[in-house]
Amino acid sequence: MTTFSELGLSATVLKTLAAEGYERPTPIQIQAIPHALAGRDILGIAQTGTGKTAAFALPIIERLVADRRPAPRRGARALVLSPTRELASQIADSFAVYARGLKLTSGVIFGGVPVGRHERQVAPGTDVLVATPGRLLDLIDRRALSLDQVEVLVLDEADQMLDLGFIHALRRIVTLLPKKRHTLFFSATMPSTIANLADGYLTDPVKVAVTPVATTAERVEQRVTFVEQGRKPALLEIVLRDPAIDRVLVFTRTKHGADKVVRGLEKAGIPAFAIHGNKSQGQRERALEAFRKGSCKVLVATDIAARGIDVEGVSHVVNFDLPNVPEQYVHRIGRTARAGADGIALSFCNGEERAYLKDIEKLTRQSVPVAPAPAGFDVGSPSLAAAPEPQKRGGRGRPGGQGAGHGRGAPAQASRGEGGRPDARKSDARKSDARTSDGRKPQEAARKPDSRNADPRKAEGRRGDGRKPAPASGGRDGSAIGWLSAGGPRRGR
């Protein structure tokens, strides 16, 4: 088995790694470090959690230590671009650990912090600067920073930078860099837009790839429960009261959705924090710190904000909303079962999200087993109480049923309320003349419901939000869904 000493690292760096408990390099480190030490440009396909930060940080440190020239004023010798504040902070912390005792300077800049503070920070120059593209260009436009002496450039999570709309910023940044430089380019996926961007940054790169994005972590138990959107909050409350839950990441598609989930949990007496792009830097840091320390076991996040969250001991991931980009599902559930631990991933799927589930299963080449809702729980529609039957294909190759016939991402094509449902308030007024299947206008149907189709459960008692109280079930230990316990299905639960 390969060791760090076999990768060509110096004795000083090896000593630091040993002190930090690093025993064996990961596959991406084994493939990338020797080429990076040799000065080759690298095009790496690797997702979060594969150890790629050390794969580029260690060779950069070796280069800077071997050539002890001073950092340029208002500049940097090595620049690392990151899509999010959290990931930028995590990368900067890693550099500080790996370079401990080597007298290298490092800094991190991102939005949400007064720009004047960053101007003062970069003025004397720094060996390693970690930055988000937006704040980097802010400082360049204010003539507080120059990139003309950058020796090493790293683009990390390039696919997420494009998702965040940084493509124009990245194209501008590359024109401000020296043509002669060492570049390392990492992305979890490699669509044509990323490949084209890489062509503009890299010269004769070595290509390395580990853990394809379509591969889910082997130690993650995956399950999906079918439930209407309006019943998801009640189901989430039941799930989070399960004693098996230790530390859980809850994912929503939107920032508004994350805040709404947190408000609902707080009303139910379940402490939770939300983390997304509209939160201030202080709020994001406090939420992450509480989650890491375990003082708050529930963190609700969007996909973008979750990049850079590397917290040990996440026992469960809950997809409150299924992602409409299937690769995001793999990233989400990879937040649990880290460092050899087991993990549980539970997804809530409404009728309109079944197309997303099909895309996920197609990408990962595996079916997600169905976990029925707790006994007695009202999922909102009898058709959602069990796994769906095989559906006919509709529209442009999409599954039939709700939203069929609209092509990829059908639910997102209409004006949406929370969770991707079409917003009735913005529907076309001309549709008021449409009639229901029994010949009545929608207004008449609303005033005079058809008793033949009425759901008898809806005549029962309601709680404050108009929904029937959802009883918990599963035994005296409060377990809501039996497989939530660690190792659930394999232990016969």
Image (cartoon, rainbow, N blue to C red):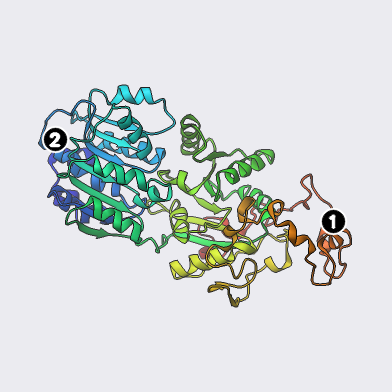
Residue positioned most to the front: 430
Left or right side of 157 for 283: right
Asked whether, in this view, residue 143 is left or right of residue 341, the answer is left
Q: Number of marks in the image?
A: 2
Disc 1 residue type (three-letter): Glu
Contact (Cβ within 8 Å) of mark 2 with mark 1: no
Q: Is residue 24 visible?
A: no
Q: Is residue 346 above or below residue 89?
A: below
> In the picture shown, does residue 326 fall above or below 59?
below
Residue 142 vs residue 317: left or right? Answer: left
Which quarter shows the N terminus? bottom left
Residue that badge 1 annotates: 460
Relative vertical location of residue 9 with respect to residue 385 in this rendering, above or below: above
* Residue 74, percent from left and from top: 24, 27
Q: Quadrant of the C terminus?
A: bottom right
Which residue is located at x 54 percent, y 51 percent?
Answer: 253
Indicate the amino acid at tag 2: Val
Compared across the picture, whether 296 is left or right of 381 comes to left
Residue 138: percent from the left, percent from the top? 35, 32
Residue with the mark numbered 2 = 65
- In this view of the protein, which residue sits in the foreground, 353 or 375? 353
Residue 390 found in image quarter: bottom right
User: Label for residue 493?
Assistant: none
Say which quarter of the image contains residue 17: top left
Question: Disc 2 on helix, strand or loop?
Answer: helix
Q: Residues within 10 Å of mark 1 (few under 14, many from 20)?
A: few
Helix, strand or loop at label 1? It is loop
Pick the front one: 294 or 402: 402
Which residue is at the front of the view, 356 or 437?
437
- Tell me the crowding category of disc 2: few under 14, some 14 to 19, or many 20 or more residues within 10 angstroms, Cα based: some
Earlier-in-chain disc, 2 versus 1: 2
